[in-house]
Image (spheres, rainbow, N blue to C red):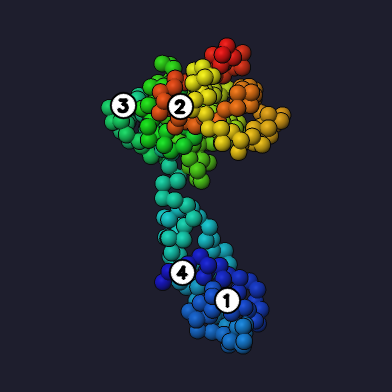
Amino acid sequence: MTFSKSTINAAKKIVKKSSGSITANKSNTQVCDLVEVGEWIGKNIHLTHADIQEIETFFEKQLGERLITYSTNSDSRMDMARPGLDEKSATGTVFQSLLNIASKAEIHLHRQPSISPEAKYIASVKLKDLCIDSLSHVVVVENGEMLVHWEMVADALPEEWQDSLIIYRGHGENQKDLIELINLLSESKVKLALFFDYDAAGLDMANDLMPQDGYLVVPDTDLEQLKSISKQEAFADQHPQLNMLLANKQIDSKIFEHARKLSQATLAVTQEHLITNYIKLSVANNVDTQYQRIDNG
């Protein structure tokens, strides 16, 4: 027999409370109906001490472990397929514990064949299977659309970075793995760059992930072309966020410099607009040399 998370949690609360009366809500009613205990009095269900013990015994028999310590919190459907629990009650998506990657270069994996550069597809792998020692350059992209068009992203990068491992920043569990990967790369000689939207929101997210020795991917073009693809409505919407970013005393110096440029030029340019319009990208890691084409007009 399988149960929803709400049913199990309701049973746990009833047993922990050890009260003679509980509210006759949907979950409590379902528990009492399953065990066939309780006396309905108005909007409440009266339970004897023996009823509560019977509830505990019933669920522990079905779950195969103690009800009070049974955990219903997991992102994985495999974890949630334990005895007694409905796997569809898992909170995470099926692929969120995997890193989504692509590259023009060969991708080396532990204990399994490498991914050939001729494959030209997106792979989903566990962090532990990624052979970090074989990497030289990694580019994290903000959204999944950029990973779908990863070859266009690679072609827009400087030549040194075109064979980078391109990885989607992810969400949920795979973003935790990304953060762990970033920490591992910081301990290696691998160069890491973040390619996010060239707007306040994008720089803000990049600032949260940027390691001390990381690089920032920025458009390598003149101001006039950038203004032609800028979303002024988005700039207006994000202006408070931009001001907060500029006021952040903990901000990465190169991100601060580009936030300042966004403010001066009133720019908000998405990754999609940069790639679709074949804007070349540069990779900056110090303020003095970055993005001079905009400074020079």
Instruction: Tell me the kind of residue under disc 4.
Output: Phe
How packed mark 1 is, by other alpha carbons closer than 10 Å (few <14, some 14-19, many 20 or more), is few
The answer for how far apart the CA atoms under marks 4 and 1 are is: 17 Å
Q: Quadrant of the N terminus?
A: bottom left
Q: Residues within 10 Å of mark 3 (few under 14, many from 20)?
A: some
Nearer the observer, disc 3 or disc 1?
1
Mark 1 or mark 2, earlier in chain? 1
Badge 1 vs badge 2, beta-carbon distance below 8 Å: no
Which residue appears at 41% of the width and 46% of the height? 95
- Name the amino acid type tagged 3: Pro
Marks 4 and 1, the one that precedes in the sequence? 4
- List x then y, in percent, for residue 82: 43, 61
Q: Quadrant of residue 125?
A: top left
Q: CA distance from mark 3 to mark 4?
A: 46 Å
Compared to residue 34, the image places residue 133 above or below, namely: above
Badge 1 element: loop
Mark 4 nearby-residue class (10 Å; few <14, some 14–19, many ≥20): some
Q: Nearer the viewer, residue 9 or 168?
A: 168
Q: Which residue was labeled with disc 3?
A: 117
Compare marks 3 and 4 and give the one earlier in the sequence: 4
| Residue shown at 32% from the left, 34% from the top | 121
The residue wearing badge 2 is 274
Q: Which mark is residue 25?
A: 1
User: In front of the other: label 4 or label 2?
Assistant: 2
**Residue located at (51% from left, 40% from top):** 175
Q: Of the numbered discs in the image, which one, if any, rests on residue 3?
A: 4
Name the residue: 44% across, 51% down. 93
Q: Position of residue 240 (x, y in %)?
A: 66, 36
Give the secondary structure at mark 3. loop
Label 4 with label 2: CB-CB less than 8 Å? no
The amino acid sitting under disc 2 is Leu
Q: Amino acid at mark 1?
A: Asn
